[in-house]
Amino acid sequence: MQVLEDFRLVSGILIETISIIAGDKMQLARKNVQNITPYVGGRPIEEIKRQFRLKEVIKLASNENPLGGSPKAVRAMQKALKSVNRYPDGQGFYLKKGLAEFLKVEPENLVLGNGSDELIDIIIKTFVEDDENIVTSEVTFLEYEIISKVNNKKVITVPLKSFKYDLAGLKNAISDKTKLVFIANPNNPTGTYLTKGQIQDFLKGLPEHVIVVLDEAYDTFIDVDDYPSGLDYFKDANVITLKTFSKGYGLAGLRIGYAIARKEFTSFMERVRQPFNTNLIAQEAALAALGDKAFLKKARRINAEGKKYFSSALKQLGIFYVDSVTNFILMDVQEDGVGLFKKMLEKGVIVRDMKQYNLNNFIRVTIGTEKENKRFISVLKEIKFDKRRAK
Ligand code: PMP
């Protein structure tokens, strides 16, 4: 039984187990669905507590906000609970109005989504014909590829260059069959970003039939001057920008994000989305969170301090890490990342191995609170550098 538990522990392997169980039975799922490697998320805290009989478990695996949700959002949710017998406003009128004022765009430039995950799906369904393809990078947000494949669309991926999107490579990969290009800026899992100049150069001279999706899920943590905002391009170029309340605003559990684009794009995306795709609680919470500047400021400060701490601690340990503008750090642990992930799990620290990306010696760690960051570094030290105690 323990063997089976261990087997399941390793992220990704569960999938193989499922296909073995399926055995020789006739497969009824569509072929493209059979060929999909499922998305493997961070392991939930409660599950690890149960499994290892641990009292305290910290999760630094899903790039969540360690401070909880914005207090203003929490109050708005409590108020909204009274209305859960009603369907939400399918148009998200007040949230769109608030966002439009905040972003200085028209409400018609916005499409709300059940997380930006859902918007990726809506975009593909809205724009990509069956014989068209989608271009993105290797080692980027896996949902671009998974959702494309679910929709039976061909995906072309281009290798990274020095842990960054290779924009020249992406441009080369574009053909007359390419409809969408997904760019995560900053990128997950590397934490790297593309500059204003690089994005502008990329957009210049792109064929008219190509739409570029700039996924800015981590923009709330940015503190560099040359970061480009999709907001500057969507009026003149075929650009759709994705944003989310899951990271800086601390509302990952509510599932709410939005797309910004020209009305000619959003009007068709509105036809594709489900009528009540974002829920009533999430709409109210997101609107309140948008006005909670103090919370966002604190989240940014804690993140910047945590990043500084990680940098110096990792340097001291001689562990290579990729410079990050986000709330997570990709690091080369110089041993099998899955093995290390498992050892850390047993000690109540959940991180993310990078096996899905073929970065076998890497793990990705979300920046947490000061206490969580210290715990991670101390457990890492214990496992890697004090082999006797780790046994
Ligand atoms: N884009 C990127 C680059 C991400 O890393 C994530 C979340 N991991 C998402 C989009 C999805 O965010 P959401 O919670 O809004 O679905």
Image (cartoon, helix red, strand yellow):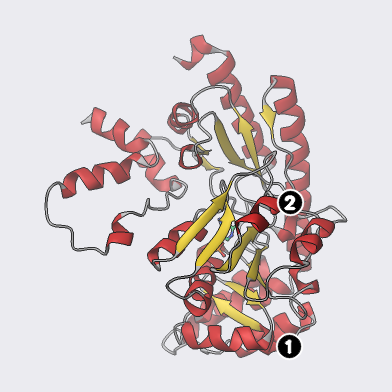
Dot 1 falls on a residue whose secondary structure is: loop
Residue closest to the far right: 225
Residue closest to the far left: 25
Horizontal side of residue 325 vs 144, given as left or right: right
Q: Is residue 36 visible?
A: yes
Q: Position of residue 391 (x, y in %)?
A: 44, 14
Judging by the rendered image, the residue that carries numbered circle 1 is: 106
**Disc 1 versus disc 2: distance between alpha carbons?**
27 Å
Residue closest to the far front: 176
Q: Is residue 278 visible?
A: no
Horizontal side of residue 291 vs 77, given as left or right: right
| Figure quadrant of the N terminus | top left
Q: Position of residue 212 (x, y in %)?
A: 65, 68
Q: Quadrant of ligand 1?
A: bottom right
Q: Residue 40 or 84: which is nearer the viewer?
A: 40
Q: Position of residue 132 (x, y in %)?
A: 49, 70
Q: Is residue 123 above or below residue 359?
A: below
Please give the name of the residue rendered at 51% of the width and 41% of the height, measured from the top-left corner.
357
In the rendered structure, which amino acid carries the disc numbered 2? Tyr
Identify the mark at residue 193; answer none if there is no mark: 2
